[in-house]
Image (cartoon, helix red, strand yellow):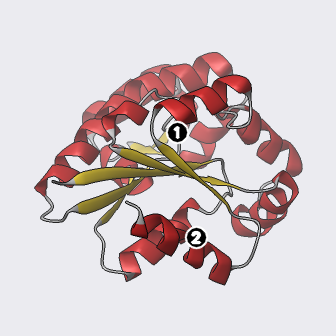
């Protein structure tokens, strides 16, 4: 029986690194970010975004940086964007996962808990990483200011809160502490695969 497994964690926790490793091992791996790139090119989606965020659309294309600036400073704007994009992304993702002929299929889902999507998967692989390490890498990787990083981190699900721990427990989550090197992370993923 096919198992659908979500890979999630806060910004800079190592989701993409884990996803790449699983793909290198030969597993089918999908990315919500890649699916979002397909969706933001659709005229119907662009129209919805332009109506709410006119400055985020230039020459009939979404300017992702302008859109990010509009939403990460406003809870209301972020909720609107998520309410428009998340259902479309998840619908497309689940269709793609179903079509794959494999016992294990993975998806990198950054906002899994924020969107209440954890129960759409058989298992959830959560990557946790020290905040300071995440911030350091994000400055290098995405060229973001500390203020932008803090704003994004604060808008995300808190895995270590009481509510966070309870939701992890309720959705059959496996938590991987990703504070070591790449070799350590790969070993932990290998261990996860042996019990999945």
6 displayed left or right of 28: right
The image shows residue 104, relative to residue 167, as above or below, that is: below
Residue at 20% x, 53% y: name it.
96
104 displayed left or right of 19: left
Q: Is tag 1's residue or tag 2's residue first in the polypeptide sequence?
A: 1
Residue at 53% x, 26% y: name it.
53
Which quarter of the image is occupied by the N terminus? bottom left
Any part of residue 117 in sight: yes
* Circle 1 crowding by C-alpha within 10 Å: few under 14, some 14–19, many from 20: some
**54 or 157: nearer the viewer:** 157
Which quarter of the image is occupied by the C terminus? bottom left
The image shows residue 16, relative to residue 88, as above or below, that is: below
**124 or 75: nearer the viewer:** 124
Residue at 82% x, 57% y: name it.
135
Dot 2 falls on a residue whose secondary structure is: helix
Which residue has dot 1 on it?
A: 111
61 displayed left or right of 146: left
Q: Residue 34 at what x, y percent from top left?
A: 38, 57
Q: Residue 28 carries which label?
A: none
Which residue has dot 2 on it?
A: 188
Q: Residue 69 at what x, y percent from top left?
A: 68, 37
């Amino acid at each position: 029986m096919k198992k659908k497994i979500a890979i999630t964690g806060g910004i800079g926790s190592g989701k993409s690194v884990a996803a790449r490793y699983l793909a290198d091992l030969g597993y089918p791996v999908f990315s919500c970010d890649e699916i979002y790139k397909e969706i933001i090119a659709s005229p119907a989606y662009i129209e919805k975004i332009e109506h709410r965020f006119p400055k985020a659309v230039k020459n009939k294309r979404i300017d992702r940086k302008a859109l990010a600036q509009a939403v990460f400073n406003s809870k209301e704007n972020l909720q609107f964007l998520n309410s428009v994009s998340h259902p479309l992304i998840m619908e497309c993702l689940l269709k793609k996962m179903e079509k794959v002929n494999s016992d294990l299929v993975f998806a990198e889902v950054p906002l899994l808990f924020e969107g209440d999507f954890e129960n759409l998967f058989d298992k959830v692989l959560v990557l946790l990483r020290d905040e300071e390490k995440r911030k350091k890498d994000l400055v290098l990787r995405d060229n973001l200011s500390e203020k932008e990083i803090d704003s994004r981190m604060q808008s995300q699900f808190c895995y270590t809160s009481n509510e966070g721990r309870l939701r992890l427990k309720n959705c059959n989550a496996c938590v991987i502490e990703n504070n070591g090197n790449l070799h350590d992370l790969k070993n932990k993923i290998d261990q996860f695969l042996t019990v999945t």
